[in-house]
Each structure stands twice: as C-alpha cells, then as structure tokens.
Image (tube, rainbow, N blue to C red):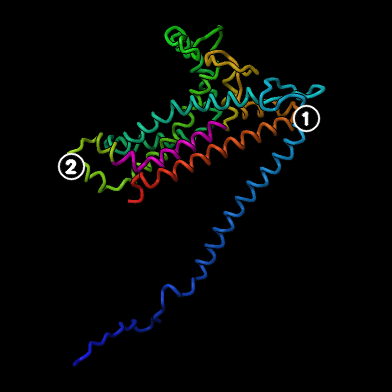
C-alpha cells in the first residue's frame, strides 16, 4: 500500500522561512507600541494632575466658605466671611447646554444625511467644505455676531414665544429688555456646535457598508426606509460620540457666552428673562478681579465643571458600549 506524503513548500531563494506567530517583532513595531503606551500614560498623568490641582484649591475655598457650596445662590467670595455657591452656575450651564443640544443635534443629523445620501456630488463637496470652514471659526466671532446682529431680531421671537407658548412657564417672559437670556445663549451654543456634530456624523454615515444599503434597496425599501433601517442603526454610536463632542464644547464655552449673556445670580425657569450664568463664563469674567479666596472659589467651580464633563463622557461611553452590538457596526 502506498502512503501519501506531503511536502512542505520551499521558501523562495534568499528568504528565510519563519513562523509568523513566533517571529520577533520589528524595531519599528516596538517603538510604535512604546510611543502609544507612553502617550496613553502621559494623558492619564495630565488628567490626574489636573484633578489633584483642582481638588486641592477647591478644598481651600470650601474650608473658608460659610454657605452651602452646592445650593447657595450667592456669590461673594471677597466678603467676611466669604460666601459662594454654584447652584446658579450649574443651572445655567446645564440648561444652556440642553437647549443647544435640542436644537443642534436634529439639524446636524439632517445636514449630514443630506450631504452623504441626498445631495448631488457637485453640491455635496462644496457644502461639506463650508461646514468644515464653520467649525474653524473662533468662538468670539460667533459671540459678536449673535450679540450685534442676532439679539435685536430675537426680541420678536421672544414676544411670539411669550404670547403663544407662555403657558409652558419656561417661555413666560415676566419682564422687558433685550434678548440676552439663557434661550439666546442656547441658540448661540447650538450654532457653534452644529459644524462639529455635522462633520463627525457625516463621516460616520459615509462609512456605512454599501452592501447594507443595496440589500435594503433590493428588498424594495425606499431611500428613507433604507436610511432608517441601515444608515441610522449603523451610525448610532457615531451620532452619540459626535453629540458628546459638541456637548463638551457647549459646557466649556467662555467668551462667546460672556459677550451675549447678561448674567445675574438668579435661578429662574423663565428662559426668556435676563439672568443666569455658566461656569466658564463666570470664571472668565471674574478671575482677574478676584482675591485669593475668590480665585480658589472659581477653581472650585471649575472642579464641578470638570466632574460634570467626566460624568457626561462616561455616560456616553456606557451608552455606546451597550448599543454597539445592536448597531450593525460589527457586521
């Protein structure tokens, strides 16, 4: 009986046969791995040093504070005894960011879908370039444009909202004055974060596998049904990531808000009334004139903003991790 024998393929002349899994890594690979690991460790060290600095300075301020740091609406760190609280700043920061996200996210998704799936190629490229250009405009330019050009026109919108939507309480305008309020700040922040969310979302939509869309079209789906069944589920995690990038800018925006808002330490649910304030705007407006305790108090408010940002990004990562297996991104 003849036995079958197998022969191993011989390597080409001049090349050594190596076992790929056990082959020694190249020097370039080792350098790249080292640089990547070092970059990650450096980032963690920077974050930890920022947290330690903010915590240390915040502890000094809180030890001298005679009010409740989280609920007091008074800000008088230069008094004797010093009194300061962040209730107004936390309220203004969260409310303005929520307004901005409610306005910007749906519009950004619509623009991204139009550029990636509806617009002709000759129109999509220039429109994408314009959106990219808007993302590079400095924030102070947006603030000046809103303060000088848009605020006078928002007076009519405020009156309309007061007349027809005043029953909702939040759009009930109790006083007169120019539209330098939290609603205007929300519109400003929405305009500023719109290009960021649009750019990231557009790139995510362009990464949808073509086979998914072709399969939906082959089954008789319309263009909108194809987007609803194939594009949006695939891009859900990307939309959340883009929204969190925009939210991060909205939470930390400083000079544009300082130009538009007429701040006062008053917590009011009437979004059309002047007043309120944000963490970043308050720090920028009062840091130069603050005394020793005042600067520690401002740093303490910065610590709260730092924690809020970490919590928001952590929640976003948790949502993305939960929805990733259902998004179709791993198909």
Residue 11: % across, % down: 34, 82
Residue carrying label 2: 219
- Viewer can see residue 307: yes
Dot 2 falls on a residue whose secondary structure is loop
Residue nearest the observer in this picture, 269 or 195: 269
Q: State whether residue 326 is above or below residue 185.
A: below
Residue 188: % across, % down: 50, 24
Q: Is residue 240 magenta?
A: yes
What residue is drawn where x is 58% and y is 33%?
252
Residue nearest the observer in this picture, 42 or 118: 42
**Left or right: residue 77 compared with residue 159:** right
Q: Is residue 39 magenta?
A: no
Image: magenta residue range? 230-251
Going by the picture, which residue comes out furthest to the bottom? 1
The Cα atoms of the two marked residues, 1 and 2, are separated by 68 Å
Which tag, 1 or 2, sits closer to the chain's start?
Answer: 2
Residue 319 image-quadrant placement: top left
Kindly indicate whether the residue at mark 2 contacts the one at mark 1 (C-beta within 8 angstroms).
no
Residue carrying label 1: 293
Residue 225 image-quadrant placement: top left
What residue is drawn where x is 26% and y is 36%?
120
Q: State whether residue 47 is above or below residue 14.
A: above
Quadrant location, the N terminus: bottom left
Dot 1 falls on a residue whose secondary structure is helix
**Left or right: residue 202 compared with residue 141:** left
Residue 39: % across, % down: 58, 55
What residue is drawn where x is 49% and y is 30%?
192
What residue is drawn where x is 70% and y is 27%?
69
């Amino acid at each position: 009986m003849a036995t079958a024998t197998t022969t191993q393929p011989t390597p080409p002349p001049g090349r050594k046969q190596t076992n790929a899994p056990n082959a020694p890594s190249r020097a370039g690979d080792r350098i790249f791995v080292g640089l990547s690991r070092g970059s990650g460790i450096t980032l963690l060290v920077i974050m930890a040093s920022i947290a330690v600095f903010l915590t240390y300075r915040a502890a000094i301020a809180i030890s001298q504070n005679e009010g409740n740091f989280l609920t007091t609406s008074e800000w008088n760190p230069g008094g004797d005894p010093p009194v300061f609280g962040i209730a107004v700043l936390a309220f203004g920061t969260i409310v303005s960011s929520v307004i901005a996200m409610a306005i910007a996210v749906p519009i950004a998704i619509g623009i991204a879908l139009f550029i990636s799936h509806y617009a002709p190629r000759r129109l999509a490229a220039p429109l994408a370039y314009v959106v990219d250009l808007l993302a590079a405009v400095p924030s102070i330019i947006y603030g000046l444009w809103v303060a000088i050009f848009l605020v006078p026109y928002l007076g009519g919108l405020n009156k309309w909202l007061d007349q027809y939507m005043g029953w909702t309480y939040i759009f009930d305008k109790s006083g007169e004055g120019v539209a330098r309020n939290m609603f205007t700040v929300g519109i400003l922040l929405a305009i500023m974060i719109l290009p960021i969310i649009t750019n990231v979302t557009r790139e995510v939509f362009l990464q949808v596998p073509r086979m998914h869309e072709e399969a939906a079209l082959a089954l008789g789906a319309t263009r909108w049904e194809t987007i609803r069944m194939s594009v949006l589920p695939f891009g859900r995690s990307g939309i959340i990531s883009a929204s969190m990038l925009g939210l991060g800018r909205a939470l930390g925006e400083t000079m544009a808000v300082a130009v538009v808002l007429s701040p006062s330490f008053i917590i009011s649910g009437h979004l059309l009334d002047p007043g309120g304030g944000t963490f970043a705007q308050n720090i920028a407006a009062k840091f130069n004139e603050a005394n020793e305790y005042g600067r520690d108090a401002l740093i303490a408010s910065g610590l709260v903003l730092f924690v809020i940002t970490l919590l928001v990004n952590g929640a976003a990562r948790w949502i993305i991790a939960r929805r990733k297996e259902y998004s179709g991104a791993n198909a």
